[in-house]
């Protein structure tokens, strides 16, 4: 299986370069494609600085969309990348890493055993009543988000006769097979709902097999300290001391989010 990396970024050019250097160091034979989603006026600056690490550089057509739209519908930016650029490139599956993810070592080792056509979504789980009551995107105390969630449930019930529980994830680290993009592009109403439940549920509807691995995602785990958990979507910065302690372990974690500083060594 030909694995590639899609590096998704829009700010902090020095940190972006640092991340790409690390990915290259740990994965010298993997192609890295760039997806830039920031201001179009700054695109050439980033291209000049980062192109030596990239096999391709693409500027998203959605660069002018509001920040909230990009947050909720970032999956549409990924699909746009596939339609406009990605399908012309050579790869079987692509690992999406963002600028504030720290990746140390081999990406292939992180996904050892994955089969062609399988998808990985960080924090994948059933959207049960416990999550529904606690999660900003579904709970009643966020009426706009709740309304969108209920509208999405009604939509997939009517469109696909889907009445099972939804799936959800935390959109931190993803691996997409080419076959999923091919199917996904044909679906209508891709802006229905929020990507962290719409994308995994659509993947299930499309019969996409999932690859499951514990990468230490924080999901309302009261006993876990968010700063000492490898991946969290709350913007709680990961402690450097925790990262270094994991790197000393033979089977420790090697991917961390968010980490928004330069990394000088592994």
Image (tube, rainbow, N blue to C red):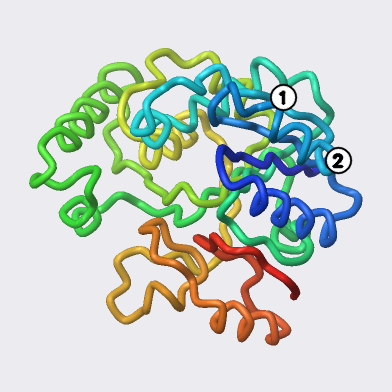
* Disc 2/disc 1 C-alpha distance (Å): 19 Å
Asked which secondary structure carries label 1, the reply is helix
Q: Residues within 10 Å of mark 2 (few under 14, many from 20)?
A: few
Tell me where residue 157 appears, x and y as whole percent: 26, 24
Q: In front here: 64 or 129?
A: 64
Please name which of the two marks, 2 or 1, marks the residue nearer to the observer: 2
Instruction: Please give the label number shown on residue 264.
Output: none
Residue 122, x across and y down, in percent: 51, 54
How far across and how far down the image is residue 97, in percent? 62, 48
Quadrant in the picture for residue 215: bottom right
Residue 213 can be seen in this image? yes
What's the residue at 18%, 31% (across, down)? 150
**Going by the image, does 185 lie left or right of 225?**
right
* Label 1 neighbour load within 10 Å: few <14, some 14-19, many 20+: many
Residue 1 shows in this picture: no
Specify whether 140 is left or right of 204: left
Judged left or right of residue 11, residue 6 is right
Name the residue rendered at 42%, 31% in the picture: 70
In this figure, which residue is indicated by the disc labeled 2?
52
Residue annotated with mark 1: 86
Q: Observer-nearest residue: 149 or 45? A: 45
User: What is the total number of numbered labels drawn onto the structure image?
Assistant: 2
Q: Is residue 266 above or below residue 75?
A: below
Residue 219: where, in percent of width, then height? Answer: 35, 63
Q: Residue at x 43, y 62 (%)?
A: 232
């Amino acid at each position: 299986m030909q694995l590639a990396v899609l590096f998704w970024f829009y700010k902090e050019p020095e940190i972006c370069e640092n991340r790409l250097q690390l990915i290259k160091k740990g994965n010298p034979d993997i192609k890295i494609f760039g997806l830039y989603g920031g201001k179009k006026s700054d695109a050439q600056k980033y291209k000049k600085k980062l192109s030596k690490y990239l096999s391709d550089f693409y500027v998203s057509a959605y660069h002018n969309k509001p920040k909230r739209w990009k947050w909720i519908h970032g999956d549409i930016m990924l699909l746009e990348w596939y339609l406009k650029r990605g399908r012309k490139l050579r790869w079987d599956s692509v690992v999406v890493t963002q600028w504030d993810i720290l990746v140390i070592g081999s990406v292939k080792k992180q996904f050892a055993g994955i089969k062609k056509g399988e998808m990985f979504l960080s924090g994948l789980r059933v959207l049960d009543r416990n999550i529904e009551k606690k999660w900003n995107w579904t709970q009643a105390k966020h009426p706009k988000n709740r309304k969108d969630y209920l509208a999405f449930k009604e939509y997939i019930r009517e469109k696909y006769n889907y009445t099972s529980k939804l799936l959800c994830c935390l959109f931190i680290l993803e691996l997409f097979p080419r076959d999923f993009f091919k199917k996904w592009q044909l679906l209508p109403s891709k802006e229905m709902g929020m990507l962290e439940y719409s994308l995994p549920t659509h993947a299930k509807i499309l019969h996409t097999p999932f690859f499951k691995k514990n990468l230490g995602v924080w999901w309302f785990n009261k006993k876990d300290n968010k700063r000492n958990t490898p991946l969290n979507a709350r913007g709680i910065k990961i402690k450097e001391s925790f990262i270094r302690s994991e790197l000393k372990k033979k089977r420790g974690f090697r991917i961390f989010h968010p980490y928004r500083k330069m990394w000088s060594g592994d």
